[in-house]
Amino acid sequence: MENRDIDEIKKDITMSESAIESVLQEKRLFTPPAEFSQKAHIKSIEQYHQLYKEAAADPEAFWAKLAETELHWFEKWDKILDWQPPFAKWFVGGKINISYNCLDRHLTTWRKNKAALIWEGEPGDSRTLTYLQLHREVCQFANVLKELGVKKGDRVGIYMPMIPEAAIAMLACARIGAPHTVVFGGFSAEALRGRLIDAEAKLVITADGGFRKDKVVALKAQVDKALENNSAPSVEKVLVVQRTKEPIHMEAGRDFWWHELQKNASADCPAEPMDSEDVLFILYTSGTTGKPKGVVHTTGGYNLYSHMTLKWAFDIQDTDVYWCTADVGWITGHSYIVYGPLSNGATSLMYEGAPRKSNPGCFWDIVEKYGVNIFYTAPTAIRAFMKMGEELPKARDLSSLRLLGTVGEPINPEAWMWYNRVIGGDRCPIVDTWWQTETGGFMLTPLPGATTTKPGSCTFPFPGIIAEVVDLDGNPVAKNQGGYLVIKHPWPSMIRNVYKNPDRFRRTYWENIPPKDGQHFYFAGDGARIDEDGYFWIMGRVDDVINVSGHRLGTMEVESALVSHPAVAEAAVVGKPDEVKGEEVFAFVTLEGDRIANEDLVKELKQHVVKEIGAIARPGEIRFTDGMPKTRSGKIMRRLLRNLAAGQEVAGDTSTLEDRSVLEKLRGGA
Ligand code: PRX
C-alpha cells in the first residue's frame, strides 16, 4: 500500500460495508461428515481448539515439535526463532534440504515405487513418475545444472509449461541450493526480462513451447526476446526442454537441449545440506507500485509450513490422488503442486492444459481417469463451470472425490453451493484457503474433519497463526465490522524479505499499521471481517492490487505498460467486477494531444499491454477521457473511477476533487 492516501483507503473499507450486508445473511452451516472426521488427521473441532491453544501459548515449541517429527534435518537447529522485527529466522543453524524431504526420505519406505507425479498433457499424452524415478531425474538434472556452472546461491529462472520437467527443475535447484525464480509461462518477454534482471539469474530453464487451449505457446521465442541484445546480462545459458518439437532458434554456446545433457548425466547427486535460512526461491508478485516485487522464501520454515498445511487442511492420506489445477508459476503451484505434496509423500497430479472450447469438460475427464480424491481450484474456474451447466460434470464419474479446495479470491456463496452439490455430490468438505505469495502456505482455512463451514468464509486461522481484523491503529474492530487483516506473530513460511529491497519489505507489510507496545502487525493488504461465531470473511484487497481470475495484478503495473505506448499521456487502471473472473482490468486513458481515439487504437493498446505484461493483464475495456479525477494534491481518485467502471453512482465524498467537470464528462463516457 505504498504511496496510498490513508483517507482514501478508509473510505474503501467503509464502502465495502454494503458487500458485507449480503454475506451477513449467510447462515447455512456445513458440518464435516462423521465418516470423514473419523479417518481425518484432525478429527474434531475440540482437537483443532486444543492444537490452536497449544500453538498460541508457545508457537516456538509447537513448530519445533512438528519440525522434529515431520521433517528430516541433517543437523538440528540451535535456536527455533530469531525475531528481529520485521525480520524472522526460523530453525536457526539447522541444516536441511527440501529436495531430500520431498524425495530421498521416501525411497527407504514402501513409497519408493508410489506415483509422485501423475502428469496429463493437453494433447492427451501422459506420464507417471514414481518417487524413485523422480529422484533419479532430479539428481541427473541437478548434475546438469552443476556442469553448466550453477553453484549454490546462483539464481535460476524457470519459464516452463506445466510439464514434469518444471517440477524436476525446481527440485534440482533446491537440491544444489540454487534459488529458483519461476516465471509464469503466460507472462510476456518483457515481464520475463524484468524478473531475470532483478533476480540476476545466471541460467534460464525453458521449453521450445507448451500446449495451452489448443495453441502452441512459443516459450523459447519469448526467452530469446527477453535476452535480446544482451538485455539480461546475468543470463549465461539457457536449457531447453523439447516439448512441442516446433522449430526454434538455438544459439550456439548459450542454448542447450535438456534431453541431450540429461541422458549422460550421473544420477548420483547427494542433496546439499542447506542452512534453514538459505533462500529456497524468489517469486515475483504484484504490488502497489509499478514493478513486481521478489518475495523471498527460505528453506526450513517453508518446508515445514507447506508440509503441515497440506497435511492438516487437505487431510492428505497415502491413498489419495491429489490434484491442484494451478500453474507452478504461482505460489499455489510451488507449495501445493510440488513441495507440500511431495514432502508428504503424496501423489500429485499435474495438468498442462486448461478447459477450452474443444474440451470444456477436461477437468472432469481427468478426475474420472485418475480417480482424483482431492481437487483444488479457483472460484473463477468454478463460476465458469457454473455457466457451462451441470451436464458436463454430471456426464463423468466424480465419486472418487472426497475433498474440494478453493483459493485465490473470495468465493461467492452461490458458487460455493454449486461446487458442493454438483462437484462434491453433497459429501465433500470444502476447504476455502486464504493465503498469499508472501505467506507461503494456508493461513485461514477450515480443517475438513473438524471445522463446520459457512459458504464464502475461509473460517479460522491455522494452528500457530494469530490473525486479527483491526483498524489503522491496530485496534481490533467490532464483530462483523470491516477492517484490515493482520497477522500478529511470525510463522515459519513468512516472507523473509523483498529481494534486494528491505525498505520496500518494511513499508509494504509492516508500516501501514505501525507497531504498538512491541506488537508488530503483518499487513496482508486484504479487508476482512470476523462474524459473531469467530469466522473470517475476506472482503478483497484494500490496495491498488486487483484480482483477475485469481491472479494478482498491480494496477500501476498495467498503467506503466499503457503509458509506455506513445499515444498515451496518462492512464488509470481499476478493477471492474466481473461475474466469472471476479474482476476485470478497466483502463481510463488520456491521449497525447494529436492522437485520435478510435477502435483501432483500443485494440492496439490492449495488445500493447499483452506485450508488456502478458495476456492476463489485457484490459477488458478502455475508456478515453480528457482528464482524470484528481485531488488538489494531484492524486487520481481511483475510488471514483472504480464506481464509474462498475457502472455505479459515484459514492462517498467527492469534496476533495479538484475539477468536478471531469467527473461529469467521465460519467457521460466522453
Ligand atoms: O486478496 C487475497 C486473494 O489473493 C491474494 C493473494 O494473491 P497471491 O499472492 O497471488 O496468492 C494467491 C494464491 C494464494 C490475497 O491477498 N485471496 C487468496 N485466497 C483467497 C483470497 N481472497 C479470498 N479468499 C481466499 N481464499
Image: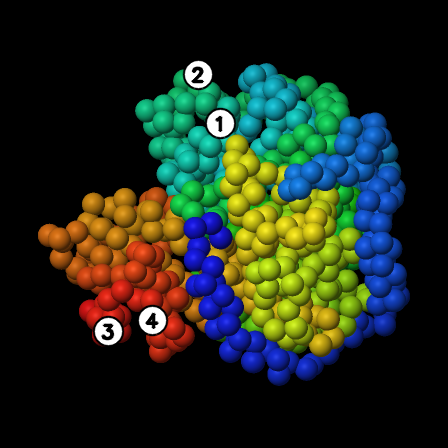
**Corner quadrant of residue 117:** top right
For the point 70% across and 59% down, which residue is it?
467
Residue 441 in picture, x, y percent from top left: 67, 50
> Is label 2 in contact with label 1 (beta carbons under 8 Å)?
no
Give coordinates of residue 588: x percent, y percent: 29, 61
Residue, x 56% and y 80% (percent of image)? 22
Mark pair 3, 2: CA separation: 60 Å
Which badge, 3 or 2, is on the more N-terminal residue?
A: 2
Above or below residue 106? Residue 518 is below
- The mark found on residue 200 in the picture is 1
Q: Sequence order check: which comes first, mark 4 or mark 1?
A: 1
Callout 3: SS: helix
Three-letter amino acid code at the position of disc 2: Gly
Q: Earlier in the sequence, mark 2 or mark 4?
A: 2
Asked if labels 1 and 3 touch by Cβ distance under 8 angstroms, the answer is: no
If you read the primary sequence from the N terminus, does the residue marked by circle 2 or circle 1 appear first?
1
Residue plotted at (46% across, 36% down)? 195
Residue topped by disc 4: 655
Q: Is residue 254 left or right of residue 650?
A: right
**Residue kind at label 4, given as amino acid type:** Ser
Residue for badge 2? 253
